[in-house]
Image (cartoon, coloured by chain):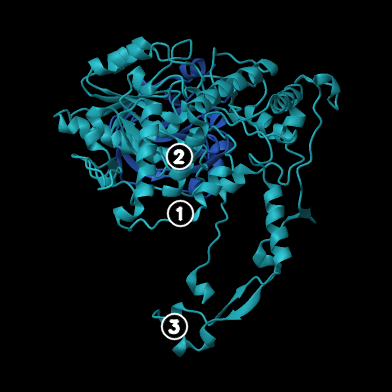
Chain colours: A cyan, B blue
Amino acid sequence: MSDDRPDGSDDGNTPQSRYDQARYVENGEYEPLLSEKDRTRVEIGGGDDDTDGSPLPDALTRDSLELPELSEPELARHYTRLSQMIYGIDSGPYPLGSCTMKYNPKFTEDVAALPAAAVHPDRSEESVQGTLELLYRLQDYLGRIGGMDAVTLQPPAGAAGEFVGIRVAAAYHEHNGEGHRDEVIVPESAHGTNFASAALGGYDVVSLPSDDDGRVDLEALEAALSEDTAALMLTNPNTLGLFEREITTIADMVHEAGGLLYYDGANLNALLGRARPGDMGFDVMHYNVHKTFATPHGGGGPGAGPVGVVSDLAPFLPAPRVRERAEGSPAGEPVYERFDPEHTIGKVHGFDGNWLVLLKAFAYIARLGDEGLADASASAVLNANYLAERIEYDVPYGPFHHEFVASAGEQDAADVAKRMLDYGVHPPTTKWPEIVPEALMTEPTEVESKDTLDRLAAAFNAVAGEDDDALETAPERTTARRIDQTTAARTPRLSWQALEDDA
Amino acid sequence: MSFDVPDERRYLESHEWALETDGVVRVGISDFAQDELGDVVFVELPDEGDDLEQETEFGVVESIKAVSDLYAPVGGEVVAINDDLFDAPELVNEDPFGEGWMLEIEADDPDELEALLTAEEYEDQIA
């Protein structure tokens, strides 16, 4: 099969040609803003202060303002150019480790765009039975995938889910007269959000070192556990992609001390359909539906971070949840209803959570089914291992699952990342976790083909062979060259106008 | 690479330096620390008149790479802060032992300094 490839090669070690990202730069200027292209003054409310109908004082209202007045092709070209100046998953591979930047199939957008999906959250339960059934079934899917007994869909993001999980754990301890527990243990290599969620939840954070193999150090864990321990937060496989082999022992130790075991769903992609946090002894978990179930990475927009718990913690979940009413309809159909868990911590977001995001997660899970989900995790692990095998950088810890952490060695990992852009691929996550010097944390995800992985490996290897001069001046073929982070941080240019100046 | 470690000062393991003159202790971070941090972009300091205890946090230094807490080498009252750093945090990089100083503490007990690392001991630590 490889023989008829145009470049006559099929391995990742062939010299990789460099790549020109589309560059819309004229005379050193980027594509201008719409407001820089045209400003046409438009009258408001007939231009008469007394009759503009606004309840605001005259000093706060304007008679006219300038808006860009452009034709449709001008507008279309503007946005097309902007889209080509950036690199996204629709442009090529995006192997940011721990972020799981997998391609989201477009059919989920179609499902979310169906007229039936546009449901006002204040409608009566009787009139939105389909919506409630879908939420109920998503709670059920997620519960079964994670091995959890009850799920809330309300938290609006992964980190919000972590915070909710910690608050649910706190409410559980409080209810059992164990409110004195004031410590949450977090491994040093954990995602930064874990430390932040525990602290925001009111806990003191106890940092746990890794052992020489890159896993939880059981002796250090024993020393850290006490009657003050509220929870241990773990992700498994961990940040190095390594499976915590002693997870059942760890669970026993934490439970013995009266603490709860929290699962960070960041790496659930590696386990789908194969192993379940609930079966390992975890009591609480959050799901990053934007990583595992192909919903958009928020980026400031709406997200979702459902939380699953074992039955003992279910009464504390946020309100409302959705359940099947004991009594069906007169026609014998199931009827779904919202309810407040008995000792709920209350609402953490409006209504049922971000419905359209949850709908996409449901569509993805339903389309893949059990077989598809198990295949996704297998491909994620296979792709990471194939890619690691093809690259020249050292990968000090293994065996790993869906991601690996290579070391850039004598090179600066941030420079390597900038240089990889010149070869037309997105670089991995860099400089973290700190346990690997000059870390290149790489997660190709299950969606990439062998050809794409070879292209990615070729980019890694081309950069591995380059000298400091090439690295320090990179990127040279992208729209924007290297950003001056220091000046940007020391003298930020904020975009705002004082009202007085504007009047 | 070798770093400046002036002899006449005392050091904390967390890389702050202390220089005492007539009971007033001037504090900053070491050459090694500024190099590790990279370009400093922001420094947060206590107010004059605040009381500090030895080895407790007195502020924060932020670079493009990291945010680090700063620890007081000696207990006492803050009698001066270097407010030039608010507009020119780069002084910490350019002159860590001079214009990049951070604050001055009227030491409750100047003998506390004796417990800190000598220049020689600190040099061993960063070697």
**Circle 1 is placed at which residue position?**
A116
Chain letter belonging to callout 2: A
**Circle 3 is placed at which residue position?**
A58
Q: Secondary structure at mark 2?
A: helix
Amino acid at the residue labelled 1: Ala
Q: Secondary structure at mark 3?
A: helix
Chain letter belonging to callout 1: A
Instruction: Check residue A253 in the rendering and tell me which mark sits there, or answer none.
Output: none
Query: What residue appears at the point 78 percent right and 20 percent down from the top-left corner?
Result: A10
**Circle 2 is placed at which residue position?**
A362
Would you say A472 lies left or right of A294 here?
right
- Of residues A314 and A137, the one drawn nearer to the viewer in this rendering: A137
Amino acid at the residue labelled 2: Phe
Residue B119, image x and y in percent?
A: 48, 20
Residue B127, image x and y in percent?
A: 54, 16
Q: Earlier in the sequence, mark 3 or mark 2?
A: 3
Query: What residue appears at the point 42 percent right and 36 percent down from the top-left corner?
Result: B26
Chain letter belonging to callout 3: A
- Marks 3,1: beta carbons within 8 A: no
Residue A438, image x and y in percent?
A: 60, 23
Q: Is residue A348 above or below residue B7?
A: below
